[in-house]
Image (tube, rainbow, N blue to C red):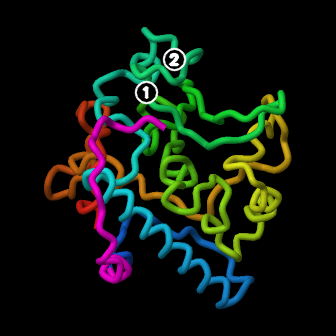
Amino acid sequence: MVQNPRRPLGFARADLGAVLVSVTLLVVIVLPVIAWGGGASGVTQSMSNLTTLGIAHILYAADWNGRQITWTRDDLGFYGGMDDYDGPYQCQFNPIDPECHPRLIAGWGELASGSWGIWAYLPSQSIAPFVPISFPDGPGFPGWGTFYFITSAPFHYYVNGRYHDATYYAPNDTTVIADVEPCLDDPAEFVGGACGGGVGPCTCNPGWSSYILSPAAMFHPDVMRANANGGFQDPWALGYGLESPGHSQTE
């Protein structure tokens, strides 16, 4: 997936112990309400998953000049939406054009022809999931956004390299696990892209992760200001509101 044009930095992993301690401060991951039917062992495994995801965030930031993961271009807020950003370049038909907004990449998987290719989410003004969350008065489908897509590339390369990986699923989240279980042992990076009527094989449901990102921590800090400082501001009205904060600003 194309990233914002920032030069990666090297990272010395000698401080991994300190990383483990600082994971507890990470606020960009939240644990949804999960049924406790699996008992304490399920909760322990879920906390282990969150620790792994927290370390992945830190490693990503180390490679990307301190930035946290984002699927939104910093300047998108200066446009009216994805159609305005992509419109001149016919990005619906040429999604890898460098002038186009980067797509959400699910990963490599098998196509209907038997060949392999990259599965990606293409833009749509009504449901485009390229902002952290769509507010009721903004472009896109209200409540939809990239905070759902923690399994997407390039973040999943810092976990285990796959869209479908057991780390993304809480053991007690039985409904979601039932949808994705056929995917977990598949050699493909992404499986089941055709579920719901697309092209290609459909061996399992793409599913949702048990964990999500905090959309509030993915906007510029001026968007979710404290009430004492003026409160919420529309990220599209700010222009720079969709510029995500650095990892250190979300701890």
Lower sequence index among marks 2 and 1: 2
Q: Is residue 16 magenta?
A: yes
Image position, residue 229 (x, y; %): 14, 54
Residue type pointed to by label 1: His
Depth check: 117 or 86 in front? 117
Tags 2 and 1 touching, CB below 8 Å: yes
For image coordinates 50% across by 72% down, the residue present is 52
Report whether 22 appears left or right of 205. Answer: left
Residue type pointed to by label 2: Cys
The stretch of residues the image draws in magenta is 1-21
The answer to which quarter of the image holds residue 137 is top left
Determine the secondary structure under disc 1: loop
**Could you classify mark 2 by the number of other residues whose Cα lies within 10 Å: few (under 14), some (14-19), or many (20 or more)?**
many
Q: Residue furthest top?
A: 88
For image coordinates 56% across by 48% down, the residue present is 152
Observer able to see residue 189:
yes
Q: Quadrant of the C terminus?
A: bottom left
Q: Which residue is mark 2?
A: 91
Examine the rendered structure and indicate whether residue 221 appears above or below residue 39: above
Q: Is residue 82 magenta?
A: no
Image position, residue 208 (x, y; %): 66, 55
**Labelled disc at residue 71:** none
Q: Residues under labels 2 and 1: Cα distance?
A: 8 Å
Depth check: 209 or 183 in front? 183
Examine the rendered structure and indicate whether residue 56 appears above or below residue 108: below
Image position, residue 44 (x, y; %): 59, 86
**Could you classify mark 1 by the number of other residues whose Cα lies within 10 Å: few (under 14), some (14-19), or many (20 or more)?**
many
Determine the secondary structure under disc 2: loop
For image coordinates 77% across by 38% down, the residue present is 110
Q: Residue furthest bottom?
A: 40
The mark tally for this picture is: 2
**Labelled disc at residue 101:** 1
